[in-house]
Amino acid sequence: MPDDPTPALLYRMNQNIMALGSALEEIGIWIGQRGSTNTSDRVSKHLQVLESNTDAIAGLMADLIARCKPDEEEEPED
């Protein structure tokens, strides 16, 4: 296991967010096909929020991951 689990955690959290967004999109389509356009429209609006934040989240995650540096090993004293 790496010393700093932050990059792996951020990656997995992003994967979960993307998977939830995809699942909601599929459910929204299914609901819309069955005639509940109001519900389908509300789902689409929530998905737009996820989509509009995608680039900002990806950029901020990349910045955080870049800041994660493994602890430098100290040279043993003679």
Image: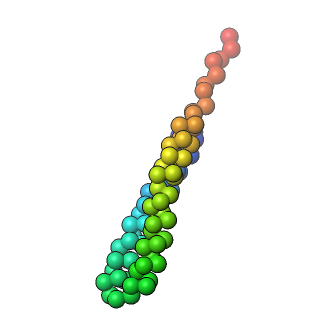
* Residue positioned 51% across, 52% down in the render: 57
In this view, the residue in front, 4 or 47, is 47
Q: Is residue 35 above or below residue 56?
A: below
Q: In the rendered image, is residue 20 in sight?
A: no
Task: Name the residue at 35% across, 82% down.
Answer: 32
**Total label count?**
0
Task: Tell which of 70 and 48 is nearer to you.
Answer: 48
Image vertical order of residue 6 relative to residue 36, above or below:
above
Q: Residue furthest right?
A: 77
Q: Position of residue 23 (x, y in %)?
A: 39, 70
Q: Is residue 32 left or right of residue 5?
A: left
* Quadrant in which the C terminus appears: top right
User: Which residue is farthest top?
Assistant: 78
Q: Residue at x 31, y 83 (%)?
A: 33
Residue extending furthest toward the left: 33
Q: Is residue 11 above or below residue 2?
A: below
Whether residue 13 appears in this view of the structure is yes
Residue 18 in percent (x, y) is at 43, 60
Name the colouring of the figure: rainbow
In the foreground, 63 or 51: 51
Q: Is 10 left or right of 29, judged from the image as shown? A: right
Residue drawn at (42%, 79%) of the image: 41
Q: Is residue 51 above or below residue 3?
A: below
